[in-house]
Image (spheres, rainbow, N blue to C red):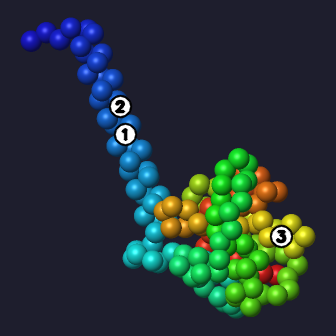
Amino acid sequence: MTVRPQRRQTIILAAIAGVLALVIAGAWLLQWNATRGSEAGAYRVTVTRGDSTLGSFDVADLEKLGTKRVVMQGKPETGPTLLSVLKAAGVDEFSQVSIYGAGIRDSGFLRLKRSEIDGNVLLDIAIRGTTKVCGPNIAWDDRVRDVERIDAQ
């Protein structure tokens, strides 16, 4: 059986498209699984000061703190303010915070001085059930997604 060159090219392109779709789906699944944890509701944001854990919040806990909607870099972000999360953990005074994330889609680290944190710095709650820290003065590339720990200093 002879396959015409045009038909062969169509078959090859379809095969390549199928493989790419599988690779993309697999990468998404791995990333989603890494941020979800081994059980539903396993995602938590922990607030620490040094070696002491001051608070731990799942998404429902964060939503109970109240949410704010702010447009940043042209995109609406919704979640509790970083200040309200810190306050709920008992942090009233601090000079800076270090924010640690999963480091899958970004560096996984951001340090903010107290003077850089106001009522518009949020822990945006993502559709997939994790948070990212964002603010009007935090560059898109500096944001930390899948926040796991906030260390107040």
Residue 92 appears in which quarter of the rendering?
A: bottom right
Q: Please say whether residue 123 is visible from this viewpoint.
A: no
User: Height in image: 24 above or below 6?
Assistant: below
Residue highlighted by disc 2: 17
**Residue topped by disc 1:** 21
| Label 3 or label 2, whichever comes before in sequence order | 2
Q: Is residue 115 above or below residue 53?
A: above
**Mark closest to the chain's N terminus, 1 or 3:** 1
Q: CA distance from mark 1 to mark 3?
A: 42 Å
SS at mark 3 in the image: loop
**Which residue position is annotated with label 3?**
118
Q: Nearer the viewer, residue 8 or 133?
A: 133
User: Which dot marks residue 37?
Assistant: none
Question: Which quadrant of the view contains residue 118?
Answer: bottom right
Q: Is residue 115 visible?
A: yes
- The 10 Å Cα crowd at callout 3, few under 14, some 14 to 19, many 20 or more, is few
Separation of residues labelled 3 and 2 (CA atoms): 46 Å
Task: Choose mark 3 or mark 2, whichever is in front.
Answer: 3
